[in-house]
Image (tube, rainbow, N blue to C red):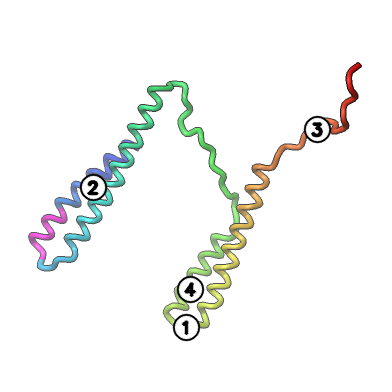
């Protein structure tokens, strides 16, 4: 994270200088503020990443045996639904430009893709978090004498 935060802060510095030069030399007033806003965004992201890296280093110093990256994320396995989203995006874009009648199939494909994706995520979540069945006999035990 440190190299990325350092790169973002250098980019922010470059963009601030670029915005100042642009405002002084250009004959229009739109580009300079846009470049300055981009510089502020890069500086913000760089500072957040730097602060996060420092906090993680401090936590690691307090507990040297702590595991870094111990959070396991659930991921959805391979599925066809991203291709459905791509087809829906194409249909929706063409429909916005040409005809409302192309928007309808785009909306249908998009809705089907959303529902299919959620179904796949739900099934994988249920399979991943299902309680393990015990192989122990489930008959009640007789009381000890």
Mark closest to the chain's N terminus, 1 or 3:
1
Q: Does residue 100 lie above or below 38 as drawn?
A: below
Give how far across and how far down residue 26 sits, in percent.
Answer: 11, 64
Q: Main secondary structure of the magenta part?
A: helix
Residue placed under numbered mark 3 in the picture: 135
Q: CA distance from mark 3 to mark 4?
A: 52 Å
Mark 3, residues whose alpha carbon is within 10 Å: few (<14), some, or many (≥20)? few
Q: Residue furthest left?
A: 24
Residue ID at (10%, 67%): 27
The residue furthest top is 145
Mark 2 vs mark 4, CA separation in Å: 36 Å
Q: Of the two numbered discs 3 and 2 on the same chain, state the one appearing first in sequence.
A: 2
**Residue in the foreground of this view, choosing between 131 and 79:** 131
Q: Nearer the viewer, mark 1 or mark 3?
A: 3
Distance in Å between CA atoms under marks 1 and 3: 61 Å
| Residue span colored magenta | 18-26
Q: Which residue is mark 1?
A: 99
Instruction: First in sequence, mark 2 or 1: give its number.
Output: 2
Residue at left offset 58%, top offset 50%? 76
Q: Residue at x 54, y 60 (%)?
A: 82
Tell me the residue that label 4 is attached to.
92
Q: Secondary structure at mark 3?
A: loop
- Tell me residue 118's x, y (percent): 60, 57
Q: Quadrant of the N terminus?
A: top left
Q: CA distance from mark 2 to mark 1?
A: 43 Å
Label 4 vs 1, first from the N-terminus: 4
Label 4: how many residues lie within 10 Å, few (<14), some (14-19) or many (20+)? many
Q: Is residue 99 left or right of residue 15?
A: right
Nearer to us: label 3 or label 2: 3
Would residue 132 appear left or right of 10 to someone viewing this image?
Answer: right
Callout 3–callout 4 Cβ contact below 8 Å:
no
Numbered circle sitting on residue 11: 2
């Amino acid at each position: 994270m440190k190299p990325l935060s350092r790169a973002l802060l250098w980019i922010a510095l470059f963009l601030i200088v670029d915005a100042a030069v642009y405002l002084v030399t250009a004959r229009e007033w739109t580009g300079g503020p846009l470049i300055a806003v981009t510089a502020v965004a890069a500086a913000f992201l760089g500072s957040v990443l730097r602060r996060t890296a420092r906090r993680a280093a401090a936590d690691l110093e307090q507990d040297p045996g702590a595991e870094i990256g111990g959070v396991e994320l659930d991921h959805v396995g391979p599925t066809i639904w991203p291709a459905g989203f791509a087809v829906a995006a194409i249909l929706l874009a063409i429909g916005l430009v040409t005809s409302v009648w192309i928007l309808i199939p785009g909306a249908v494909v998009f809705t089907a893709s959303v529902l299919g994706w959620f179904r796949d995520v739900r099934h994988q979540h249920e399979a991943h978090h299902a309680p393990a069945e015990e192989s122990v006999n489930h008959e009640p035990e007789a009381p000890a004498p």
